[in-house]
Image (spheres, rainbow, N blue to C red):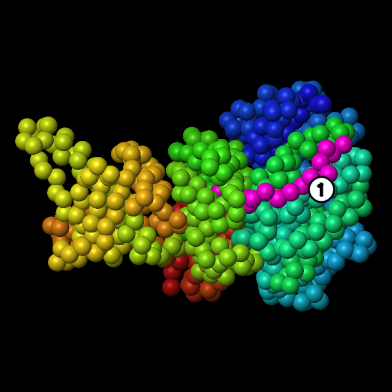
């Protein structure tokens, strides 16, 4: 077995590979850019080598620097992770030329299947049913418009070397093709060092289901069941699960066998994924083959018990697969939620900065339920503008789908992140969505169910009462402490009120709070003092803790909280509310306070996230119409087009291409 391997990647996948290598007794070498010198994967590895500036094109994508690091440390093999050089045939060939093993497939497979254009040609020749499209490289925007018109709208514009949703756009018109072509080409260049673009028909109402395959150097190939990845935003997967709730045994077997046949046709070795689009009648079409480990591989590992990274390493060393097709069984259900440094309340714009607090739920298995968290960050670390915005991959496993989903809801509520914006509230909302729970999903789920973006979850009455009871409990703890301290200072004992008014948004309710042996008895009453409902709250929560864990009427509840000036900011199952507990007199007086008016920023174009200005599309004095492109800002390898929200005149431009801006920095000012 290899004695030392180098991981040509960063973040959570580098940490993931290091964990398996350590388990196998293999030493590891990390590589890092200047932006990653304090990264978790650098700390975890046995050795680390600096390879250049923060931009991936000057560090992680430079083949010579990776090979030099191998030679300097004596690494015998390289695991590429995913993204970066993982599907780069030139990289695989360069390693081979220097006698360094590539922990991935043979160069033929990388060349044929790692290239989205060539893989489609190969699949067509092999009689594999594929999505209609133009397999040639698109020369320019005019060529893209011509081809899109020939295929018929809508179309998908895709980077040939793409992956992870980078360099992909859906276009429904000529103008969207021209704009999407330019953006996809630019993203592909910065993400993969390859700006070739192709176009194919976009199949409406599809499900995205992929088959995991494993092959060795001795001709053995098996499929390791499927994953469903239909919950996507901007072609970027958000939630994955295994198995698929849609497939029956016959379709699963047919897809698996087709995936194996395709893999055998290119003498595939290592772990790989054959992706399919599946329609409502379970007809499936080959989409592409990823000749690498997938981001969502943990859900497959959780339902099969197979360590895919270990298998990749053993295959690269020349070992035969020790697993036969008949050995692969489905055990339970697994869900993966991708935790991103994005603000779901601002159209998922990237968020960067320091992780002031990073407290994921505890990993492990208890009572048949498992939590796994693959991450590459730590409390106090920095989320950079240079790389993918993923913070962690939170996974849960249970005996069935609904149990795994409920366990995920609890895990998300327990996941505490401060210092940056993140998408946990959005993920929590999806977990509670009836359509998601039913399994009736397509790749259009997010666009269809959140057409105007995410604005939080409306609280049902039962949940509002639960959160109100939690707020009353915390208020009781804080008030008890305040009364005790005040009494000690003044020498005059004070009595704590037992009657309060709790308010959440426009809703308010008088309550009585009484401490009994079993916990705090919270009685909700009407204006005349008659009991409406009752909640018994039991918890060991103490002030200073940012996650409330307890029981209400015997049912467990986990709520995240921030102490607000007027009460408690509570986050639960996708909702984020301010709960205020006051005395009856305090409640009446609060209603008389004037409402604070927000500042008017409608005359300014503000930078929506920390990022780099790629271009300014207008000039001072220019009249613009609603929807006109004003500027393009890049953050975390994604280009964001900023458009005019009304007809107006540009009176002042305060930024230029190349400027690095903070969130809410003024880009330009408008006049009538």
Is residue 403 or residue 274 the one in the foreground?
403
In the rendered image, residue 3, in percent from the top left (x then y), is placed at: 78, 23
In the rendered image, residue 294, in percent from the top left (x then y), is placed at: 72, 48
> Is residue 628 visible in the rendered structure shown here?
no
Is residue 271 or residue 47 the one in the foreground?
271
Residue positioned most to the left: 492
Q: Which residues are magenta?
A: 320-339
Q: Quadrant of residue 63?
A: top right
Using residue 603 as the reference point, say whether residue 524 is left or right of it.
Answer: left
Using residue 285 as the reference point, say whether residue 98 is left or right of it.
Answer: right
The residue sitting at 68% across, 55% down in the picture is 243
Is residue 384 or residue 465 the one in the foreground?
465
Q: Residues within 10 Å of mark 1 (few under 14, many from 20)?
A: few
Image quarter hosting the C terminus = bottom left
Q: According to the image, label 1 marks what residue? A: 326
| 283 in relation to 487, above or below | below
Under circle 1, the secondary element is helix
Q: Is residue 662 magenta?
A: no
| 545 in relation to 149, above or below | above
The residue sitting at 37% across, 45% down in the picture is 550
Using residue 151 as the reference point, say whether residue 549 is left or right of it.
Answer: left
In the rendered image, residue 96, in percent from the top left (x then y), is placed at: 89, 34
């Amino acid at each position: 077995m290899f004695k030392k391997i180098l991981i040509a990647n960063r973040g959570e996948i580098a940490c993931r590979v290091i964990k398996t290598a350590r388990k196998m007794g293999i030493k590891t070498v990390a590589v890092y850019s200047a932006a990653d010198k304090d990264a978790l994967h650098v700390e975890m590895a046995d050795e680390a080598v600096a390879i250049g500036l923060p931009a991936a094109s000057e560090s992680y994508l430079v083949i010579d620097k990776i090979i030099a690091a191998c030679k300097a440390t004596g690494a015998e093999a390289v695991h590429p992770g995913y993204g970066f050089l993982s599907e780069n045939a030139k990289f695989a060939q360069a390693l081979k030329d220097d006698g360094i093993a590539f922990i991935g497939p043979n160069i033929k497979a990388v060349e044929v299947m790692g290239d989205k254009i060539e893989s489609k040609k190969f699949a067509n020749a092999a009689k594999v049913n594929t999505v209609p499209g133009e397999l040639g490289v698109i020369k320019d925007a005019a060529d893209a418009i011509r081809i899109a018109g020939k295929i018929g709208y809508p179309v998908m514009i895709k980077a040939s070397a793409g992956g992870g949703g980078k360099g992909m756009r859906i276009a429904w018109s000529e103008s969207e093709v021209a704009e999407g072509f330019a953006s996809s080409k630019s993203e592909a260049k910065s993400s993969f060092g390859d700006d070739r673009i192709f176009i194919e028909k976009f199949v409406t109402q599809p499900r995205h289901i992929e088959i995991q395959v494993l092959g060795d150097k001795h001709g053995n190939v098996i499929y390791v069941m499927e994953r469903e990845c239909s919950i996507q935003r901007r072609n970027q997967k958000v939630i994955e699960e295994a198995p698929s709730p849609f497939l029956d045994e016959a379709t699963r077997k047919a897809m698996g066998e087709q995936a194996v046949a395709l893999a055998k046709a290119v003498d595939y070795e290592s772990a790989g994924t054959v992706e399919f689009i599946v329609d409502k009648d379970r007809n499936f079409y080959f989409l592409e083959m990823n000749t690498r480990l997938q981001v969502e591989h943990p859900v497959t590992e959780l339902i099969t018990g197979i360590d895919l990274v270990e298998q990749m390493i053993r295959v690269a060393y020349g070992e035969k697969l020790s697993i036969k097709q008949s050995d692969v069984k489905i055990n339970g259900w697994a869900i993966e939620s991708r935790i991103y440094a994005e603000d779901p309340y601002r159209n998922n714009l990237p968020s960067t900065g320091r992780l002031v607090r990073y407290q994921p739920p505890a990993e492990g298995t208890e009572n048949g339920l498992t939590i796994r968290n693959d991450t590459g960050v730590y409390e106090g670390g920095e989320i950079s503008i240079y790389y993918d915005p993923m913070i962690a991959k939170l996974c849960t496993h249970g005996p069935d789908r609904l149990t795994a989903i409920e366990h995920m809801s609890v895990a998300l509520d327990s996941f505490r992140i401060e210092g940056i914006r993140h998408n946990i509230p959005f993920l929590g909302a999806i977990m509670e969505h009836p359509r998601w729970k039913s399994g009736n999903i397509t790749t259009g789920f997010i666009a269809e169910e959140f057409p105007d973006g995410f604005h939080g979850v409306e609280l049902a009455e039962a949940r509002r009462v639960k959160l109100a009871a939690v707020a009353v409990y915390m208020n009781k703890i804080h008030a008890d402490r305040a009364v005790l301290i005040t009494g000690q200072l003044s020498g005059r004992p004070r009595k704590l009120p037992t009657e309060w008014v709790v308010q959440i948004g426009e809703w308010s309710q008088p309550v009585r709070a009484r401490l009994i042996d079993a916990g705090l008895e919270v009685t909700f009453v009407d204006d005349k003092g008659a009991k409406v409902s009752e909640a018994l709250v039991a918890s060991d929560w103490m002030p200073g803790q940012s996650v409330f864990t307890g029981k209400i009427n015997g049912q467990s509840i986990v709520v995240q909280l921030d102490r607000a000036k007027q009460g408690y900011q509570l986050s639960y199952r996708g909702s984020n509310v301010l709960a205020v507990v006051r005395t009856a007199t305090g409640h009446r007086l609060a209603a008389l306070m004037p409402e604070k008016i927000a500042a008017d920023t409608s005359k300014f174009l503000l930078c929506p996230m920390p990022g780099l200005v790629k271009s300014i599309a207008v000039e001072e004095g220019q009249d613009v119409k609603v929807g006109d492109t004003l500027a393009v800002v890049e953050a975390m390898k994604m280009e964001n087009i900023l458009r005019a929200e009304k007809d107006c005149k540009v009176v002042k431009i305060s930024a230029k291409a190349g400027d690095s801006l903070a969130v809410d920095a003024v880009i330009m000012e408008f006049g009538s």
